[in-house]
Each structure stands twice: as C-alpha cells, then as structure tokens.
Amino acid sequence: MRRKLIAGNWKMNGGLAANESLLKALMASVEVDVSEPVVSSEVLVCVPALFLAQCAELLAGSKIAVGAQDVSAHKSGAYTGEISSAMLADYACKYVIVGHSERRAYHHETDEVVAQKALQALRLGICPIVCVGETLEQREAGKTFEVVAMQLQAVMDVLDEGALARIVVAYEPVWAIGTGKTATPVMAQEVHAHLRSLLAQRDETVASKLRILYGGSMKPDNAVELMAMPDIDGGLIGGASLNAADFLAIIRAA
Ligand code: 13P
C-alpha cells in the first residue's frame, strides 16, 4: 500500500507574515488529525527558496515536511542565482519539485536538464518530485501518452533502480493548472496507469511502490474522487494549498 503524499506548491506566493499564519493553521489541525488513523498521509509544503529557513524553523518537530520548488542541475560554482541541492539539504528540505511545467515553459528547461536536477537532488538524499504533463494542444493531437513517456524516460535514463525507487512522479496536465479545469478521475487514472506501466517495464517492484501524484486544479470538491483512483497516490496542489481550510480539506480527503 502506497502512503499518500499531499504536497502544496506555493509557487511565487507568500510572505513572512502570511507564511506564519498559514503554517500555524495547518499545524494546529494536522497535529490533531494525525492521531486519528484516517489521516495517515504525508504532508508537504514546497515553498519559495527564500522562505525555506523560516518554514523549516516553524515546521520543526511537526508532521509537515518542507520542500523546495526547484534546484540547480549543477553541483556548485559559477551559476549566478542558482540554488544547489547541498544548500537545500542544509535547510532540512526533504523534497524538491523538478520539471514543473511553468519552469519548462518559462525557463526553457529540457527533459535532460530536468533529469540532471533529479540526479542532483538524489545525490543529497532529497526526493525529487518529477513533473510531467501535456499541453492542451498535445492532448487534442492524441499525444498525451507519448509526451509524458518522453518526459519520464529522460529521468529513467539517468537513474539506476535504487535511485528510481526514491523519486515521486507528478502528472500535471498543463491545461488543468490554475485554470479550474481538472482532468476527470478517469482521464487522470489512464495517464497514471500508463506512467506506472512504463516504470514497470524497467522494474516492477519499483513501479508498484513509487508514488504518482496528480496536480492541476485539485480542490476539496474533487480530491476524494481523484485520490480514490488506484494509481493516484496523492496531489500536488497549487492554488488550494495557499488556503488553510482548502488544503486541510484535501489532506482529509486523502
Ligand atoms: P493549481 O492547483 O493551482 O492548478 O496548480 C497545480 C500545480 O501546478 C501544482 O504544482
């Protein structure tokens, strides 16, 4: 049985005061709820790098983990503005999102760069959440499976089985991000099952244990149905993770 992971992606939102009140509200409920067996999911917030220190300190000793939204593909050196996996590890980062569609689109990250980022994270024991997903145009052209397969393959190519077992995959259809349009549970399940079958071609045990999250307008009112699907092992949540009541409702749904 795969333990569900509910991960918030704050994107470029937040501020010192807002972060504190959001995290305190989350901790107050999550700490109570985890004593009940129904709330056994892992909870994570992926925050802007500048707030890692603040959030790691606020969340120390709590049931909520902290993660980052990006990491450099390089180990260290002359890469102005970049943040290395070693730096993230210094701030108790357990997870880092790599290859989010916004970074692929606005920062021209290729599948190969995303794979290098996953490698760098794993080198420091940080779990990369590898995002894959098709655009609306690609879906309408019937290319969804092909696109996500290529994105995942690039990462599989650089990882051995031991490393592959330590990643999380997130399926985020680009057309569903921040649009209010969600893939139906059946549509999402189809892609998740396809991703798991690709992983199984490489290693069946790894594939059966690896978590595949869904992301794209996940909200309290669709979370239950999505996460009831056999291959949906949690969510990567943008907008709704900025609101304590909504994020908590999704955690409960898991
Ligand atoms: P929304 O939940 O705002 O659609 O964002 C999804 C996402 O991109 C999470 O990484």
Image: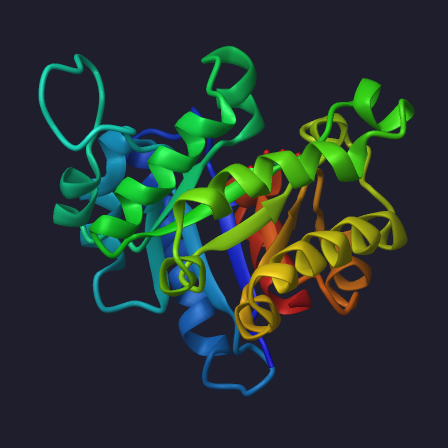
Looking at the image, residue 158 sits to the left or right of residue 92; the answer is right
State whether residue 13 appears in this view.
no
Q: How far from the left and from the top, in percent, is residue 7?
A: 50, 52
Residue drawn at point x = 76 percent, y = 53 percent: 194
Looking at the image, residue 57 sits to the left or right of residue 193; the answer is left
| 102 or 59, nearer to the observer | 102
Q: Quadrant of residue 24?
A: bottom left
Looking at the image, residue 128 sits to the left or right of residue 87; the answer is right
Q: How far from the left and from the top, in percent, is residue 188?
A: 79, 49
Residue drawn at point x = 68 percent, y = 38 percent: 148
Q: How many marks?
A: 0
Residue drawn at point x = 87 percent, y = 48 percent: 187
Q: Quadrant of residue 60?
A: bottom left
Looking at the image, residue 11 sits to the left or right of residue 190; the answer is left
The quadrant of the rendering that contains the C terminus is bottom right
Q: Quadrant of residue 86?
A: top left
Assign ligand 1 to one image quadrant: top right
Identify the residue at the far left of this view.
Answer: 77
32 shown above or below 112: below
| 25 or 42, nearer to the observer | 42
25 shown above or below 252: above
Q: How far from the left and from the top, in percent, is residue 128?
A: 40, 48
184 shown above or below 249: above
| 243 or 185, nearer to the observer | 185
State whether residue 140 appears in this view.
yes
The quadrant of the rendering that contains the N terminus is bottom right
The chosen color scheme is rainbow
Residue drawn at point x = 68 percent, y = 28 percent: 178
